[in-house]
Structures are given as structure tokens and as C-alpha cells.
């Protein structure tokens, strides 16, 4: 990172800025997509899930696969702000907050989309009144809410010194915004004692969030793995889901940091070197993921047991084959090959590869959820010349609600980018050993925490 | 049958209230029949105490509870969760007799008011491998002893009762459809939209033992017809089958019957090499099959009424 001269320069660079025309258009576009989804959801509430393409065989559709996608991408919060932080990878400091913003926004919508999938959302409280601890759904509710709570804390606590900086240094902002920063800074003055508490709590949360993060995606995989169905009946599912989640989460951070760098001209902070390192990380994560993918498909395909055979044939050479191989080629193989080369880890090519990974990951979740439901044990696959009546293609309502949920998560990210310093100012200052003037204490002595 | 049942309910309710009222008066425990009349110009209710005495009670001292539909349903729910005491229901389906007449399905659909987009009972055309003989396989809910659907339910909406029947409380179900994913036999079906209004069910309180009236956004399935079993009758499919394919009975009594023939369950299974479908998934079904040997009629594929047997898409 280029050396910074003063905390003022840092604040000027990183303080929240008003959106230009592009930012406003983007926000309006998201708003429209959300509005469209809300209209569709109104019809779904009125007419029931019959507005979807789901049926008694394909009883889960893109709401569920989209839920898995949200849970997956939100895992990155723990990767960057816990695993990398605790292993003292200093280069990832400017990414911590971006990762937490992705985590919070997406896990919120994971919770929302699962309510959208319910036949009786009006009975949501039954989960608390009659909840059965034996049901994996109840485990998922507990672990997702826990993850949301810790993620919000991991986003908010490190924001305290930055809110104080914005409160003290940001001029020419509306009174309400100043007031907001003042309230949110909780009277932060920046004493050594405060920093000590801050470091301690953030480190503590970083440790706690790792098992919880593994928990959200492992338990989500168990929603499938705990059933007696070909393709889901797998002991590999927990680690497979976790590995896949790190891939899409890392890709999400790359995509977002590229946009932030371009839009806010932050080359000084989000350097080429960080892109390079994120690219390497994504290659490594993709290779681990590939290892689990091979585990997931190779041995069942070697055996071709009754009950899995028709599913595997459908995926490899049947109706789902274009999507299956498309995901492997465009979502894993090509990005990995490109990112192996140093040139491929330059910001623009990396950004393109990351987006391919994200799109591939979305369709991968579709492939996890839906094809299995096409191949139930009964009606038996050996039915004699009987044409299959099972089919599923999401309806307009399903698409618009799903798109709205994705737009909703992006809207939250957008709003947070508009009003928060999405790169942690005090942590950069600490790392660069910048002196706070006035009543802000130097924080150097705490940096080894 | 319905109206009978309701008057008995009201009557029991009255008995309970009266017992409470009287107990305070002369600490006589009261049960049984209540009759209204007049005595000394007062309106009285005649009650029978537990030791057989008839007492007249001033009607004004009794608060007659109006039994609302919700209260009615609550009692039906308690009954539905408990099951039929002392019973352990079991079914035996004789594949050798099935010739795909589909009378079972028609009767099931009619009596449970099943709309066109779902069946509680299906008759599948089966062929275990290319060279083996095809046969018809009627399939109800298996009412497993280790039901995967019950294991995954997050709100205890679907439950296993003492008498072996697996039921659903459609007023508790949140519609997550995890049970549908968990059932390896694809038995469960869903109320995707607003259920159509059925004249005969208007004003009838919801009863989990019948799953009626239907509730939007909830799961339903074959329930072994507890309302028939309570009356000592066979389920609708067994009653309707012209070929005596379906045997029902009580495992505790070790007896099954199809209405005209009665067998020792254990002997029948032994003699006819009875088996359970997909034993390897470990769900312990309570439906047994007798293999399709020495068939009543040869398998005839032209019997196939695909449109009736196959579940159609709900659109």
C-alpha cells in the first residue's frame, strides 16, 4: 500500500460519498426489481404456492436453491474477518468490512427467502411454540440467527472508531447523518482502553464465528443429507457445502471490491496486490472444492447403484447435462485456469472470472436441489415405458421473487456502501501507524493484538 | 354419522360442566346422561351420579358451555393425537389379486374429497428388471414405525400415534415440505393453492383424523381412514376393492381381513412370503405385500389408465 501522510487524507479518501448518477440509477434499478418481486409475492400470498411451478414431486424449487446460495455466499464473512484475520494476513484488512457487509446482507435474505418458501408463513411462530429440537430445520433456524447476530456484531463493533472519525471529521453532511454517526459511535473517544476492549471483543467474536459459520452451511447441507433420496443421501455433503461456500464467498468479495475500486477510485487501498492474492486464494478454494466434487460424484458413478443411477445419468448425459457441465466448465475450470496465470489475477480479468464463479455457483445450487426430486425411489425408475410426468421450470412469480431477493441483498450492500466507510479506516491507520491528533490516542501499541 | 357425533360431543360437554357445578353443591361426582325437565316450577336438568343416583339440578346453576367450532376441533385434535387405544393397525396388500380395477382409488378420492391434482392412493405399474414380470402395485401411506417424515417435522405437525397411524395436523403445519422431501416413497401431497369449497364440509370443524376441511399451504396424505376404523369398518380402499386385494387388521390381534376372508396375519405372511417395500431404507413400514405369484388374472398392460394412476402436475 502506498504510504499515507495523515489521518485526514485517509478520512477524505474513505468517508462515505454521495452517489453520482450511476449510483442513483443502480439503486433505482434494484428498487424496481424489488418492487416487482413484492407484487409477485402478494399474488403468492393470495393464491398460495400454486403460483409456482413446484408440484408434489418437485416440492422444493428455486426458493430453496436460492436459500442455499445465500447461506453459501454469506460464509465469506468468517473467511476474511475470522480465518484470515486470526492467521494475521495483514493484506486482507481492507477487505474485512466488505466481507462482513456481504455476510450480513446475504444471511438476512437467506432467512427471508425461506419464509417465502413456506406454505403458511402466517404460522412462523409455530417454530417457537411447537419447535422440535430433533428437526434439522430448527437447527438451521438457530444457527442462522446466531450467525446473523455475530456477523452484525463483527460488522458493527469495528465500525465504532470509524463512526467517531466520521462524527468528528465529516463536514457538509445533513444534520441527521451527523447525528446518526454520533449515536452509532456510542461516545467513542479512542482511548487506549477502548481500543483494547475493541480488539479483545473482535478477536473473541472472530474465534466464535468460525464454528458457527461451518455450522450454518453444514446444517443447511443436512436439510438434504438427512433425507432418503438419491443424490442427497451423502455423508460428503457438509464439507462439500462448506468448500463450495468459501468459493462463492471469495468470488463475491472480489466482485464487490472491483466495483468499489472502480467507482470510488480506491487503487491506493484496494491494490493490484490484493487482487492478486484474492485470485490465488480463489484458485486454492476452487481446487479444494473440486476435490469434494470428485468425491461427491465419482464413487457413486463408479457403482451406479439403483436409485442413484437415473439421477447421475440425468446429470452427466441427460436433460441436466448442459447445466451440469456448464457449471463445471464456466464456473470452475475456466476461472481456475485463467487465475493460475498472473495476468489472469489482474483486477479486470479477475473480476470477470469471479462473476463467472458466482453465476456458476447459483446454478450449482439449482443442480443440488432440483434434479434429485426428479428421481424419487417411487415411482420406481424401472417403470416399463411409462413417460415421466415430473417436470419443473420456475414460473414468472418464482423468478421475480428470487431476483427480488438477490436485488434486496444487493440493495442492503448498496445502502451500507453509501453510508459506511466500507474500508475500515482505523485499521488502515493502525497498520500504517498514522498518528491521531487531538484527543485520539495513538493506537500502535495495540496492533499486535 | 356427523350429526350423531356432534350431539354426543355436546352431551359430553354438558356432562362435564354439570359435574363441575354439582360437585360444588353436594360433592357428588357426576357422569352420564343429562335430561332436561321441570320440577317445582323450576327448570331442572336430570343428571346421573357415578354411584347411579339420579339427581335433579336447577338449570340456572349450570353454565351450559356453548361448544364452539374451535373447541370442537381442539377435542378432535386431542383424540387424533392419541389414536385408538390398544390397536396397532397393519395392512397387507395381495399383489397377486390386483388387476388394476382402480376402485380403491376412486373410493378413496370420493370419500376424502380429493381434488384432481393429487392422489392419496396410487396403483403403480412395476417391473423390477427388464426380464422380470410386470405387476400392479397399489400404494398407500406405509405408516412407518420409524417415519422419516415425523423425524424431520420442525413443529410436530405430523405425528405417530399409539395405534401406528401417522397423521398430520393441518392447523399446525407450516408448509415447509421437509416431510415430503424426507418420505422415500413420495407419499405426501400438498395443498398448493386455496382448497376448493366442498358443500358437504361447510361448517364442519376441522378433524386431523380426516384432514378435512383442507387447509391451504399444508401437507396431506393417506391416513388409513381412522373414522372408518373407529366404527369397526375397513378403510375405503379395502371396502371398495372388488378383488379383495387389501387386508386390514390389528397386529395385536394378529388378524387381518379384507371383508370376506380373515387370516392370521403372521400365518398369511409366512405362507405367502410377505415382504415390505424397500426394507433397506429402514423405515419399518406397517404395510406388507404378498408377491404377485399365481395371479388372479394375467398382467395386462392394456389395463393401464395412466391418466388416472399417475399423479398429474398441479397446473
Image: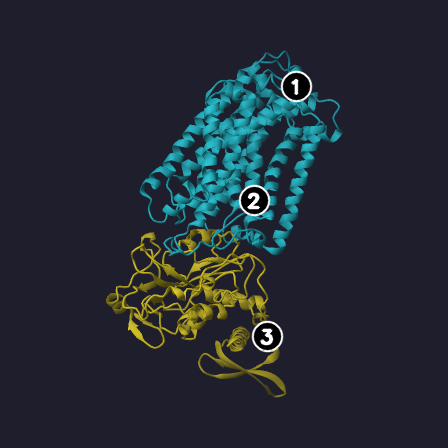
Chain colours: A cyan, B yellow
Mark 3 vs mark 1, CA separation in Å: 78 Å
For the point 38% across and 38% down, the residue is A296
> Which element type, helix, strand or loop, lies under badge 1?
helix
Viewer-proximal residue among B299 and B42: B299
* Residue at the extreme front: B302
Same subunit: marks 3 and 2? no
The mark closer to the camera, 3 or 1, is 1
Q: As displayed, is residue A350 above or below residue B145?
A: above
Residue under circle 2? Answer: A113
- Closer to viewer: mark 1 or mark 2: 2
Q: Quadrant of the C terminus of chain B?
A: bottom right
Q: Where's residue A88, x and y in %?
A: 47, 20
User: Is the residue at mark 1 from the same chain as the one at mark 2?
Assistant: yes
- Residue A421 lies left or right of residue A65; in this view the side is right
Question: For mark 3, what is the residue?
Answer: B64
**Chain letter of disc 2 in the image:** A
Residue at 46 percent across and 31 percent down: it is A332
Mark 1 belongs to chain: A
Amino acid at each position: 500500500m502506498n504510504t499515507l501522510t495523515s489521518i485526514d487524507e485517509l478520512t477524505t479518501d474513505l468517508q462515505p460519498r454521495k452517489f453520482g448518477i450511476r449510483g442513483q440509477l443502480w439503486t433505482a434499478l434494484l428498487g424496481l426489481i424489488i418492487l416487482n418481486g413484492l407484487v409477485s409475492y402478494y399474488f403468492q400470498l393470495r393464491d398460495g404456492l400454486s403460483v409456482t411451478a413446484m408440484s408434489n414431486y418437485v416440492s422444493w424449487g428455486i426458493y430453496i436453491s436460492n436459500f442455499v446460495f445465500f447461506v453459501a455466499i454469506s460464509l465469506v464473512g468468517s473467511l476474511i474477518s475470522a480465518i484470515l484475520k486470526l492467521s494475521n494476513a495483514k493484506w486482507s484488512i481492507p477487505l474485512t468490512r466488505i466481507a462482513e457487509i456481504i455476510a450480513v446482507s446475504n444471511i438476512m435474505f437467506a432467512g427471508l427467502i425461506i419464509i417465502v418458501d413456506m406454505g403458511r408463513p402466517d404460522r412462523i411462530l409455530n417454530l417457537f411454540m411447537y419447535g422440535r429440537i430433533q428437526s434439522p430445520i430448527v437447527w438451521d433456524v438457530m444457527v442462522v440467527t446466531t450467525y446473523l447476530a455475530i456477523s452484525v456484531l463483527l460488522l458493527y463493533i469495528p465500525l465504532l472508531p470509524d463512526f467517531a472519525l466520521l462524527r468528528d471529521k465529516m463536514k457538509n453532511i445533513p444534520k441527521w447523518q451527523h447525528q446518526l454517526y454520533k449515536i452509532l459511535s456510542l461516545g467513542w473517544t479512542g482511548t487506549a482502553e477502548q481500543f483494547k476492549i475493541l480488539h479483545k471483543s473482535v478477536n473473541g467474536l472472530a474465534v466464535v464465528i468460525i464454528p458457527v459459520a461451518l455450522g450454518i452451511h453444514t446444517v443447511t447441507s443436512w436439510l438434504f443429507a438427512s433425507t432418503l433420496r438419491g443424490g442427497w443421501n451423502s455423508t460428503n455433503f457438509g464439507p462439500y457445502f462448506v468448500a463450495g461456500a468459501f468459493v462463492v464467498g471469495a468470488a463475491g468479495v472480489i466482485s464487490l471490491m472491483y466495483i468499489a475500486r472502480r467507482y470510488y477510485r480506491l487503487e491506493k487501498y484496494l491494490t493490484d496486490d490484493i487482487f492478486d492474492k484474492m485470485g490465488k486464494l480463489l484458485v486454492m478454494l476452487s481446487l479444494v472444492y473440486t476435490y469434494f466434487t470428485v468425491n461427491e460424484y465419482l464413487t457413486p458413478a463408479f457403482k451406479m447403484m439403483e436409485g442413484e443411477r437415473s439421477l447421475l445419468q440425468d446429470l452427466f448425459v441427460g436433460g441436466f447435462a448442459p447445466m451440469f457441465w456448464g457449471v463445471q466448465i464456466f464456473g470452475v475450470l475456466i476461472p481456475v485456469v485463467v487465475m493460475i496465470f498472473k495476468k489472469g489475477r489482474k483486477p479486470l480479468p479477475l473480476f470477470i472470472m469471479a462473476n463467472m464463479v458466482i453465476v456458476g455457483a447459483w446454478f450449482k445450487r439449482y443442480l443440488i436441489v432440483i434434479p434429485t426430486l426428479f428421481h424419487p425411489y417411487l415411482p420406481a425408475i424401472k417403470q416399463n415405458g411409462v413417460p415421466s410426468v415430473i417436470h419443473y421450470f420456475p414460473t414468472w412469480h418464482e423468478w421475480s421473487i428470487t431476483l427480488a431477493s438477490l436485488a434486496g441483498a444487493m440493495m442492503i450492500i448498496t445502502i451500507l456502501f453509501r453510508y459506511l466507510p466500507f474500508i475500515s479506516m482505523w485499521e488502515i491507520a493502525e497498520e500504517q501507524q498514522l498518528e491521531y491528533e487531538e484527543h485520539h490516542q495513538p493506537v500502535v501499541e495495540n496492533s499486535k493484538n | 354419522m356427523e350429526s350423531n357425533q356432534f350431539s354426543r360431543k355436546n352431551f359430553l360437554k354438558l356432562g362435564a360442566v354439570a359435574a363441575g357445578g354439582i360437585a360444588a353443591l353436594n360433592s357428588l361426582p357426576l357422569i352420564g346422561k343429562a335430561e332436561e325437565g321441570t320440577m317445582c316450577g323450576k327448570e331442572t336438568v336430570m343428571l346421573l351420579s357415578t354411584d347411579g343416583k339420579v339427581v335433579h339440578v336447577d338449570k340456572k346453576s349450570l353454565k351450559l358451555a356453548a361448544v364452539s367450532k374451535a373447541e370442537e376441533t381442539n377435542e378432535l385434535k386431542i383424540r387424533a393425537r392419541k389414536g385408538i387405544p390398544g390397536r396397532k393397525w397393519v395392512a397387507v396388500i395381495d399383489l397377486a389379486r390386483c388387476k388394476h380395477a382402480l376402485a380403491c382409488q376412486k373410493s378413496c378420492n370420493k370419500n376424502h374429497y380429493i381434488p384432481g391434482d393429487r392422489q392419496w392412493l396410487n396403483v403403480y405399474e412395476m417391473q423390477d428388471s427388464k426380464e422380470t414380470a410386470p405387476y400392479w402395485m397399489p400404494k398407500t401411506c406405509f405408516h412407518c414405525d420409524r417415519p422419516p417424515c415425523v423425524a424431520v417435522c420442525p413443529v410436530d405437525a405430523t405425528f405417530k400415534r399409539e395405534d401406528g397411524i401417522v397423521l398430520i395436523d393441518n392447523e399446525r403445519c407450516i408448509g415447509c415440505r421437509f416431510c415430503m422431501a424426507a418420505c422415500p416413497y413420495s407419499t405426501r401431497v400438498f395443498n398448493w393453492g386455496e382448497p376448493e369449497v366442498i358443500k358437504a364440509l361447510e361448517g364442519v370443524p376441522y378433524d386431523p383424523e380426516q384432514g378435512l376441511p383442507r387447509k391451504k399451504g399444508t401437507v396431506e396424505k393417506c391416513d388409513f381412514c381412522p373414522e372408518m376404523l373407529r366404527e369397526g369398518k375397513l378403510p375405503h380402499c379395502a371396502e371398495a376393492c372388488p378383488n379383495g386385494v387389501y387386508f386390514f387388521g390389528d397386529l395385536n390381534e394378529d388378524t387381518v381381513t379384507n371383508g370376506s376372508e380373515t387370516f392370521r396375519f403372521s400365518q398369511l405372511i409366512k405362507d405367502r412370503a410377505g415382504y415390505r417395500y424397500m426394507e433397506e431404507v429402514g423405515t419399518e413400514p406397517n404395510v406388507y405385500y404378498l408377491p404377485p405369484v399365481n395371479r388372479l388374472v394375467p398382467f395386462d398392460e392394456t389395463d393401464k389408465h395412466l391418466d388416472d394412476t399417475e399423479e398429474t402436475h398441479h397446473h
